[in-house]
Amino acid sequence: MNTEIELKYRLDESTAQTLLNQQQLGETAIGDFAAKEVIDVYFDTPDHRLTHAGYALRFRRQGDKAALQLKSLTPASGAWHKRRELHIPTMQPTQPEHWPDTPEADFLRKLLGDHPLQPLFTIHQTRHEAPLLDGSGQPFALLSLDDVQWVAGDQEARAWELEVELLPDKDEAALKSLQRTLAALPGLYPQSESKYERGLKMLSQK
């Protein structure tokens, strides 16, 4: 499994719009923003085997690409999230027999056993992404301002979220330095819960 390291904050729309027009976060330069639509459908078995094992499973579509993504439910430390994750490219999220023959797919098949997958809820996002650049002008992290909508049956919820994901093989110290900058900005509040955990809370209120 790979390790995903990111910062998460909640904010309101006006703060998000202000950040979309900025070119700097303290001493960190922000590259050009690009918007894209992302749809995530979260799955588990009827007896919630994956959640009980400490994982969240989502099927993500972006354009003509799709993949299952399994993430560990590792507790966050304030805004700091560090989780293990694996990706399985597939257009058939509920048919393990059609997944590729890879170690990642085998790992998920073993977690599931003979238990079927069923959808839990869907998240629609408009993501505004921009690279964050170090002093030499090289990207070290990806900034994402997300307009997020959860949908579960007739229930809906909406929120804005800021995420900063460290790029592979980059130094965590750069992200920790940026965390201190973000902590001083008005209108940003550490988000210790994942989008999956907030979706589960919504389901529990049905």
Image (cartoon, rainbow, N blue to C red):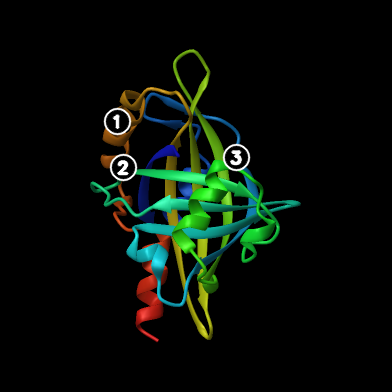
Residue that lies at the very extreme toward the right in this rendered image? 64
Residue type at numbered disc 2: Leu
| Residue named by callout 3 | 33
Q: Is residue 206 visible?
A: yes
Rendered view: 127 above or below 112: above
Q: Residue furthest left?
A: 77
Q: Amino acid at mark 3?
A: Phe
Q: Residue at x 49, y 13 (%)?
A: 136
Percent across and percent down for residue 74 are 30, 50
Asked if marks 2 and 3 touch (Cβ < 8 Å), the reply is no
User: Mark number for residue 185?
Assistant: 2
Q: Earlier in the sequence, mark 2 or mark 3?
A: 3
Foreground pick, 92 / 13: 92
Task: Sort mark 1 into few (<14), some (14-19) or many (20+) by Cα contacts within 10 Å.
Answer: some
Residue assigned mark 1: 176
Give the residue type at disc 1: Lys
**Residue 13 visible at all:** no
